[in-house]
Image: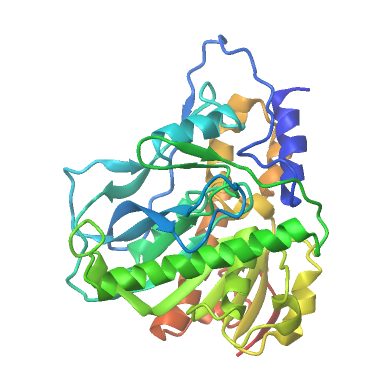
Amino acid sequence: MTTGAALAAGLALAVLPGAPTPARAASPRRAAGDGRPPVRLVLPPPSGPHALGTVSLHLGDRSRRDPWVAARPVRELMVQLWYPARRAAGRPRAPWMTGRAAEVFQQTGYLLPEYATLPHTHARAGAPADMSRGRRPVILYSHGHGQHRNSGTALVEELVSHGYVVVTVDHTYDAGQVEFPGGRVERYAMPPFTAEDDDPVILKAVDVRVADIRFVLEELSRRVRGRRDPRPHGLGGILDLSRTAMFGHSLGGATAASAMAAGAPVAAGANLDGSLFGPVVATGLRKPFLLMGEDADNKPSWPEIWPRLSGWRRHLRLTGTRHFSYTDYETFMPQVAARLGATDEQLADFIGPLDATRAVHVQRRLLLAYFDLHLRGRRAPVLEGPSARYPEVRFIGGAG
């Protein structure tokens, strides 16, 4: 099987819980000595007026043993804060993924180092926070199963460039790989499970993630109240935790719904192409919730929860997208497809036929409008109904 065929076949399986994901799937290698250099990947520039800064935090929840690796007496997490920053051209641009984690990611996935060089972000590492406009709403991001906190960087950067603080969370051992201070890398360690809605492993995974989100919010709140300012200086002073929302891809979208149902202080949530699991499907939500996904009717939990969403709600389908269109693979795979030997048809099987630049633009526009509406009270015409400007957006349902 050629690498291109493996791309289409192997990655298509990744939409199923428990199946290989791009970060972990086995990948046949082309001849490394074919003389072609790796493709240097780039992220699309964000459109907003704010410069970006970022910093990572190592957190330990001593109230929990790690639920996946019994030898770990403390649940450890890495989170990354992305925030509006003062211009700091002298500081380095942060990498898309830290060094040791990137090595594991590339060795075990399709973006092998002989094919691709991972990009830098548009954020300056440790840049001073922009305190000139006071406190900023906070948005949490939860990655898909087997993915990582960097999976949605193109969407995260756009939100930050328009004045939000975004906190991305690595769910350790559910993520493909997590690098901790000192270069220690913890790899994926969940037990096998099926695609059934009531599989105990996937239900546990959602519960673990919800506990992670609660802990991250509590820890940020403690630091703000106790003036334990996250570095760089000023960052804690711009966090407005009274205006907090959440979004996620795949299992991360399910996490957003379940965290809200469990009482986490999240005012609005968005699910990017994730099936829902657990009690929230039966109980629903009273707060705003956005369902946005691929152009397919393949998530029975969505119509099941729909009548139980009693707050503002939208169900949108983006024509020409697929499951991984809602990650940075939408941006990366067209850049590297020729190097991988993938055909246009195989690429479309993975991220859909919609032009990748357009797909990212539409997602960015919809998410920004959604969070502006519910965190800033700004009218969002793009979410009020179909428009000629965004013909790809199909309104399956809406209220509020």
Vertical relation: 315 (above or below) 253: below
Q: Nearer the viewer, residue 338 or 169?
A: 169
Image quarter where the C terminus lies is bottom right
Residue under the point 41% across and 71% down:
218
Q: Nearer the viewer, residue 167 or 356?
A: 167
Q: Is residue 164 visible?
A: no
Which scheme is used to colour this image of the protein? rainbow
Residue under the point 27% across and 76% down:
225
**Residue 200 spot, x, y in % from top left:** 77, 60
Q: Nearer the viewer, residue 75 or 86?
A: 75
Q: Give residue 309's quadrant in the image.
A: bottom right
Residue under the point 60% across and 50% down:
174
Horizontally, residue 96 falls left or right of residue 105, namely: left
Q: Is residue 39 visible?
A: yes
Q: Give residue 346's quadrant in the image.
A: top right
Residue under the point 53% across and 45% down:
331
Q: How many marks?
A: 0
Vertical relation: 331 (above or below) 26: below
**Residue 385 spot, x, y in % from top left:** 62, 81
Image quarter where the N terminus lies is top right
Horizontally, residue 251 falls left or right of residue 125, namely: right
**Residue 133 spot, x, y in % from top left:** 21, 75
Vertical relation: 217 (above or below) 323: below
Horizontally, residue 1 falls left or right of residue 93, namely: right
Vertical relation: 394 (above or below) 15: below
**Residue 298 spot, x, y in % from top left:** 80, 62
Q: Nearer the viewer, residue 189 or 20?
A: 189
